[in-house]
Image (spheres, helix red, strand yellow):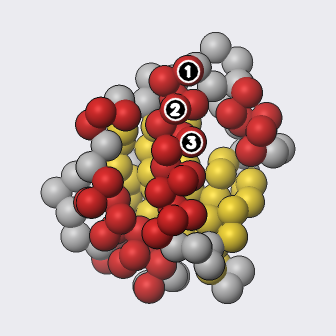
């Protein structure tokens, strides 16, 4: 496996394993459909989404799964949200396979996160 970070979306996608690439592309499509005003960019090597110049979510590609991270995650409600180390407010949903992706849950979380941009 190559590096999972990059300077462009294309570079990130090119360096992913097929399963992570499929999940990442599905997440990108879901985010664009759910929050069309969100701006997609690369920040710190991750595909990041912002509204009004403020980040609210990003896609983190791990070796064997993909995380959808929410900047104000502690203010969101879902049994699927997990914390990560010292990141106080950030919560994420871990996606291991595209078949286990709960689009309804993710859509609701995305809408909530976009409304409460930190």
Snapshot quadrant of residue 17: top right
Badge 3 is on which residue?
A: 25
Badge 1 is on which residue?
A: 18
Q: SS for tag 2?
A: helix
Q: Residues within 10 Å of mark 2 (few under 14, many from 20)?
A: some
Q: Which mark is residue 108?
A: none
In the picture provided, is 93 more to the left or to the right than 49?
left
| Distance CA(mark 3)–CA(mark 2) | 5 Å
Answer yes or no: do the residues labelled 2 and 1 have beta carbons within 8 Å?
A: yes
The x and y percentages for residue 29 are 54, 53
Can residue 87 be seen from the camera position used here?
Answer: no
Snapshot quadrant of residue 99: top left
Badge 2 is on which residue?
A: 22
Of all residues shown, which one is farthest toward the left?
Answer: 79
The x and y percentages for residue 109 are 34, 68
Answer yes or no: do the residues labelled 3 and 1 have beta carbons within 8 Å?
A: no
The x and y percentages for residue 38 are 62, 73
Can residue 26 be seen from the camera position used here?
Answer: yes
User: Against 37, is 3 above or below?
Assistant: above
Answer yes or no: do the residues labelled 3 and 2 have beta carbons within 8 Å?
A: yes
User: Against 60, is 118 above or below?
Assistant: below
In the picture provided, is 44 more to the left or to the right than 83?
right
Q: Residues within 10 Å of mark 1 (few under 14, many from 20)?
A: few
In the picture provided, is 90 more to the left or to the right than 22?
left
């Amino acid at each position: 496996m190559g590096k999972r970070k990059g300077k462009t979306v294309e570079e990130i996608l090119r360096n992913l394993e097929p399963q992570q690439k499929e999940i990442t592309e599905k997440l990108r499509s879901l985010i664009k459909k759910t929050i069309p005003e969100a701006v997609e960019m690369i920040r710190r090597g991750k595909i990041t989404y912002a509204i009004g110049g403020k980040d609210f979510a990003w896609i983190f590609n791990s070796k064997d799964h993909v995380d959808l991270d929410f900047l104000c995650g502690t203010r969101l409600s879902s049994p699927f949200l997990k914390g990560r180390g010292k990141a106080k407010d950030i919560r994420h949903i871990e996606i291991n396979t595209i078949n286990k992706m709960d689009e309804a849950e993710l859509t609701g979380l995305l809408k909530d996160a976009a409304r409460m941009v930190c």
